[in-house]
Amino acid sequence: MQRATEVNCFFACNHQRNIIIMKNFVEIAVIGGGVIGTAITYYLAKAGFDVCLIERNGIAEGTSGRCDGRVIVYDQVPGESCRLAKMSLDLFPQLPDELGFDIGWSQEGTLLLMESEAEYQIAESHCKCMAETGLPYKMLDYHQVHSEEPGLAENVVGGLSVSCDGSVNPMALAQGFEYQAVKQGATVYSNTNVLDIKSNRSNTVDHIITDQGTIRVKKIINAAGSWAGAIGQMVDLSIPIKPRQGQLIVTERTFPVSRQPVSEFGYIVTRLEQNDYQREVTPVMEKYGIAFALEPTNANNFLIGTSRCFTGFDLTSNKELLTAMAKRAIRFYPGLRDIHVIRSYAGLRPYAPDHLPIISDTEIEGFYIAAGHEGNGISMAPITGELIANMIGNIPQRIDIDPFRWQRFSSPKEVDNA
Amino acid sequence: MPNNKSIEFTLDNKTILATEGQTIAEAMIAAGHKTLRISKEGTHQGVFCGIGVCFGCRMIVNGIPNIRTCVTPVTYGCSVQTQNEADFVNTKEGIHEN
């Protein structure tokens, strides 16, 4: 099995010549070498299409290299997005063998923590509701949650376990998709910047101009994530995806502070309808959209999250935000007080106004969009790849893809009537 | 040395004598203990840079892991433990694998 540490040999051999020789023609070009773009490239190559991937920098150097590695359904509420997340999650266990690449997959579940009786009651009805859709949700009372998690703050009143959730190494996942896509005949052009896309007279995509040359194409898939808007402008589509910054703290290697990935339930409550409950937040938490999440990594470090705020394409860390995030984590795990932070990083989650990804064709013939997954890009990468490959191959989908159609933004009247 | 006052501390529950002003790592070497930490792979680790940069000399001091003993002075009665990083491995994950 391939390991992520093995250098991408494409980059190595082209680096010497310092030029990239592009083909004249490829049937499908995928723009964006994140986890979504590489997944699409893999599923298209697997289906036998002539496909290439164009990435401005290197594989997983954007959002996919600046996130956590959770593959989750716990942040979902019943609906289309939840079904999509579950279908994607179900594809993960077979991926390491399918890709022949060590993606760091493990399925340890998630534990959600409630900090008040009010939250506990909402969690009970949420648990019932999710369990009815067939998901493995289970309530843990005070004693159960504290025996599972000895490091918890005493005033945490209960837990909700979601045992189907898992984790991957997101960079290895993107590299794994790329590795197997190349094996199946795909071409990868990294360090290649897309400058413009030209259409022909019948409003069909015709060729892509890059800083490494021009390539004729029949179809283009815009998987540029937070930068999808810029690619959309090249074909006069105004895609309403914007970057939403999320920061994470990395701790030193240490004893298991938590024995599994944990999150606070209070933040999910804000997503549930018919609820006037508000968790107690400080103004700083409100300002940066802070919610507690803790993820143990394979190397025994911990990732502490999460934050959400709109700061354009800014990737700098912010001390006020990191402090608030650390304080929130210590509120749930007081032992974290003594653990050192070794670094922090920020990533740009591609935010779509209705929190649903766009996985769709468009009014431009041959131009597809697969972007806007916000915090669920890693989770939803395999299913996004499968949906796009089916769309292009005219294969019936396993799920109703109407909610993810681009047309919900391009023709608002239709949406209103429906 | 102007100050030769000796102070006691414990290493893995054994009492050790140090000179006031010594760092924990110095006292350990003086007492003949070269192993400060055991890595996840089982290799024994000691002092490397001695100036707080390399993090080679991390130990558990008063219950807090990852303390750089080469820049941490001995205090009276402090409890120092060899840091065995095999214990970092998540026990719950271990159960899942079995």
Image (cartoon, coloured by chain):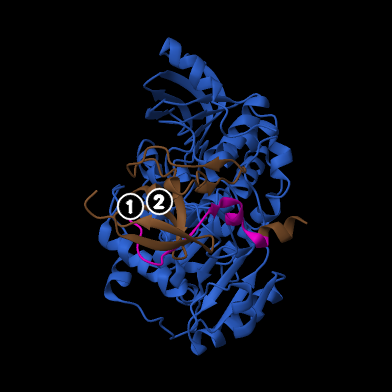
Chain colours: A blue, B brown
Left/right of residue A52 with respect to residue A230 in the rendered view: right
Chain bearing mark 1? B
Q: Identify residue for label 2.
A: B27
- Residue at the limit of the structure toward the top, as seen here: A17
Does any portion of residue A234 appear in the rendered image? yes
Camera-nearest residue between A396 and A8? A8
Contact (Cβ within 8 Å) of mark 1 with mark 2: yes
- The amino acid beneath tag 2 is Ala
Residue A6 image point, x, y percent = 57, 28
Q: Secondary structure under badge 2?
A: helix
Q: Give the Cα distance between marks 1 and 2.
A: 6 Å
A32 vs A196, left or right, is right
Q: Quadrant of residue B55?
A: top left
From which residue to which does the magenta span run? Answer: B72-92
Residue plotted at (78% across, 57% down): B98
Residue drawn where x is 48% and y is 86% of the image: A116
Q: Is residue A388 above or below residue A197?
A: below
Q: Quadrant of residue A165?
A: bottom right
Q: Taking the image as drawn, is residue A241 in sight?
A: no
Question: Residue A169 in magenta?
Answer: no
Crowding at dot 1, Cα within 10 Å, few <14 / some 14-19 / many 20+, comes out as some
Question: What residue is pinned by disc 1?
Answer: B22
Does the magenta run of residues contain B77?
A: yes
Residue A313 drawn at (x, y percent): 30, 47
